[in-house]
Image (cartoon, rainbow, N blue to C red):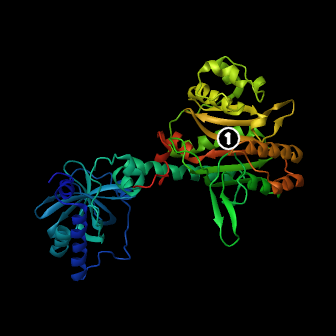
Amino acid sequence: MQENEQQKNEVSTATIDTIISQRKDKADKMRAEGIDPYPARIKIEHKIEQVRTNFDALQKEEFAKETVTVAGRMMSRRDMGKASFIDIADGTGRIQVYVRTDQVGADAFKIFKEMSDLSDFVLISGIPFRTRTGELSLKAEKFQIICKAFRPLPEKWHGLKDTETRYRQRYLDLIANSEVKEVFIKRSLIISAIRKKLEELGFIEVETPILQSLAGGANARPFTTHHNALDIDLFMRIAPELFLKRIVVGGIERVFEIGRNFRNEGIDRNHNPEFTMMELYQAYADYNDMMDLTELLIKTAAEKIGSKVNLNFRRAKLFDLIKEYTGLELLQYVETGKMYDQVKHLNLDLPKDASDQKILDQVFDEKVVPHLQEPTFVMDYPAIYSPLTKIKFDQPEIAERFELYINGMEICNAYSELNDPYLQKIRFKQQVEAKKKGDDEAQPYDEDFINALEQGLPPTGGLGIGIDRLVMILTEVESIREVILFPAMRPEC
């Protein structure tokens, strides 16, 4: 039979319910014959990748002098009377297995022929050899079903393409699409590389609360929940920033956290309401040091996975970029109420009553961001829109803040941290007033954080990198859903 013909026939001639029923019957028959279809303990000696590496030098029709034992999911099957070829796959790779009745024994071959199906997990002990066509294979001496699968493999075998199915049933996506699995392996390596580099630099990894009484540290709309025992509302954190800076106040001068944040916002190719951030704070550093550190961390992660993405970083000021791509000098119009008149000829999709901040954001997003394909540190944002950021001493309308853009997407946000408690009080009060006027993303007044600043926060640089977006860039995929194993989805009707 051609590869996967059994699978195609199964799906085309019977409903899924019928297939499940037939496979359950096979499992029951195995039990009746004293065979456990779900044994608890299995001993394997090699991963498939190891077998491929160790026996790569075998020539055509050459057999190894030793036996190996591997396990994996049965992915394809070609029956030829008293012999069959199957492919099995584990987490490291895939290999062909030659199963023959006089090698595995009549009883084992009967179980193979009558009770095994594609998607079953099987144990194979066999001799590595290379076929006359040059394919490295195993000549089975032992065959055992170690997990009876009731459902068949995805019907669209050469790539499960339905997007909804891929995201809702990620396990099918991982089975059917090897490149998907590779993305998530690389994601793990990226996080590991960042963590290792920070530890080498003397940073201490910590954990801060996910359930918080105040949703601070970023301008975002939070998710709300309720704690029954205390009878209080709590918020899923939108950022760990204010807790991490409290730790620096306490004397741990280099601190970082990699964890989930939650923001009650829309879903698109760049946004998921639950996402992973790496956030760090370094005493006696500023936003220039954070730019240097960002370059180091991203280049380290890229090297770890062999990414070929352009990482030639440049630095440019926000208002210089706006002038470059629009011809407009907009800094002088921030919070004057005259911003709209300056930009209305740009034909932006904006209501006339839009705030100056929303207008500036829209100008930047529509007219500048599409040009930021190479890695660009966009520096020096308006201080009024950066409530947790230190201002430039000689230019108080500007905050020492940057955002990094790569391929037209924001990857990180960082700044020299505001450590003046008096000025931070003013900023918090401005945020409270903004919330009263309808800005549901404005930050609350955090009295305890003010107390911490009054205790003394040394000059500090802070950095937050969106891990999901960084993985998107380094693995060159187009949607954040491709790098989150289980992205947010609307419930099925």
The residue that label 1 is drawn on is: 413
Indicate the quadrant containing the N terminus: top left, top right, bottom left or bottom right: bottom left
Residue at 80% x, 42% y: name it. 430
Q: Is residue 475 above or below residue 331?
A: below
Of 201 and 212, the residue lying toward us: 212
Residue at 68% x, 45% y: name it. 441
Of 171 and 314, the residue lying toward us: 171
Q: Position of residue 277 (x, y in %)?
A: 62, 50
Q: Horizontal placement of 158 versus 428: left or right? A: left
Res 88 visible: yes
Q: Position of residue 200 (x, y in %)?
A: 68, 52
| Quarter-of-image position of residue 255 | bottom right
Q: Quick one: label 1, few (<14), some, or many (20+) residues within 10 Å?
A: some
| Quarter-of-image position of residue 375 | top right
Of 421 and 252, the residue lying toward us: 421
Q: Horizontal placement of 24 versus 231: left or right? A: left
Of 73 and 264, the residue lying toward us: 264
Indicate the quadrant containing the C terminus: top left, top right, bottom left or bottom right: bottom left
| Quarter-of-image position of residue 35 | bottom left
Q: Amino acid at mark 1?
A: Asn
Q: Position of residue 140 (x, y in %)?
A: 23, 65
Q: Is residue 290 above or below residue 209?
A: above
Q: Residue furthest left?
A: 81
Residue at 72% x, 25% y: name it. 339
- Tag 1, which secondary structure? strand
